[in-house]
Amino acid sequence: MAFRLAHISDVHLAPLPDVRLPDLFSKRITGYINWRQNRAAHMAGGTVGQLVAAMAKKMPDHIAVTGDLTNLALDAEIVNAAAWLGELGNPEHVSVVPGNHDAYVRGALSKAVTAWRANMTSEAAGITVTRSGFPYLRRRGPVAIIGVNSAIATAPFMASGIFSRRQARGLGQLLDRARDSGLFRVILIHHPPVRRATTAQKRLYGIRLFQSVIREHGAELVLHGHTHLPQRNEILGPQRLAVPVIGVPSGAEAPGGKHPAAAFNLFEIDGRPGHWSCSFEEHSLTGKTGLTAVTDRRVLYR
């Protein structure tokens, strides 16, 4: 039976908790204004709950969440996100990596990683990792879930990320281990690791480095969020074989706005090394009733 992997991202959980004036003496002031003037109108409803309910009906074996669970990385938001992850499923069945909003100000990333550690536990010892414990590896059925962190605190009006050399070493080690174990390797990262996927102030620094790791060590699939768009790209692996890079719209976007409606991607993975099969469907909310429609369907491996 095929392994079912669901992918959601950028849920920007609402509503905002009480914001104290001292909390706004930082980059948070710009994010708070943006939330009040723009995002609250189309992200503060029950969209995330509707999307999660629709996703649960598909009975995925595992759920991948690629960051931006919070808006301003307030302490209360981080705690609320931990509770939401618990409602989403057993930590063994839900993996997460942080997004730029989860590292909005200095110190926030450490707090988020600590609060969400149960969803980032690694099953690989002796690997080069960052201070926050990335990359991590979790084996689930025929799949290796490999989490990479690109989130950092940035200046106001910036939302860029970094893929470091230390993570590159660890990622290469994990990809080799997972390959040698005969696993289908899925990398989770918040920022898209491809050029021209987003604007300069939102880009990932270290794209060339990330792609060089994939070119040398290989992977079967890369999942990301960040852009709130249903992006489909490829990067080259060994022997110039294409590795799909798939993005998903924000899980908080109400239908009918200027951005794509909230969606989740559902992947079906089966087979063995050299003979993998993998297809996916994008399921998007159609309206306030919580119904979804398949808005994209593709075969990645056959």
Image (cartoon, helix red, strand yellow):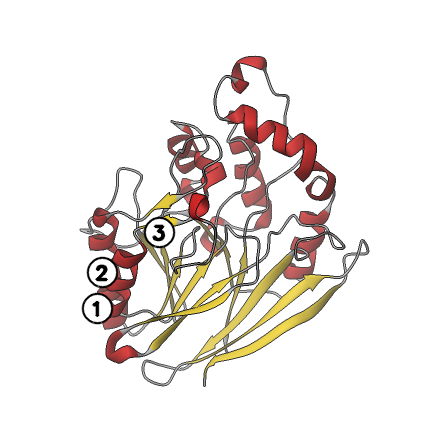
Which residue in the structure is indicated by mark 3?
148
Q: Residues within 10 Å of mark 2 (few under 14, many from 20)?
A: many
Residue 31 in percent (x, y) is at 56, 31
Label 3 residue SS? loop
- Residue depth check, mark 1 versus mark 3: number of the one nearer the observer: 1
Q: Identify the residue at the far right of this view.
A: 289
Q: Nearer the viewer, residue 154 or 126?
A: 154
Residue 205 sits above or below residue 57 on the image:
above
Does 240 sit left or right of 247 as displayed? Answer: left
Residue at the spot 29% in from the left edge and 62% down from the top edge? 211
Label disc, if present, on residue 172 of the rendered structure: 2
**Residue visible at 50% across and 50% down in the picture:** 226
Mark 3 vs mark 2: which is more N-terminal?
Answer: 3
User: First in sequence: mark 1 or mark 3?
Assistant: 3
Using the rendered image of the protein, determine whether residue 241 is visible from the camera's viewpoint. yes
Of the residues shown, which amino acid type is indicated by label 3? Answer: Val
- Which residue is at a point 53% across and 52% down the rendered structure image? 227
- Determine contact: label 2, label 1, CB under 8 Å: yes
Tell me if residue 98 can be seen. Answer: no
**Mark pair 3, 2: CA separation:** 11 Å
* Residue 48: percent from left, percent from top: 67, 48
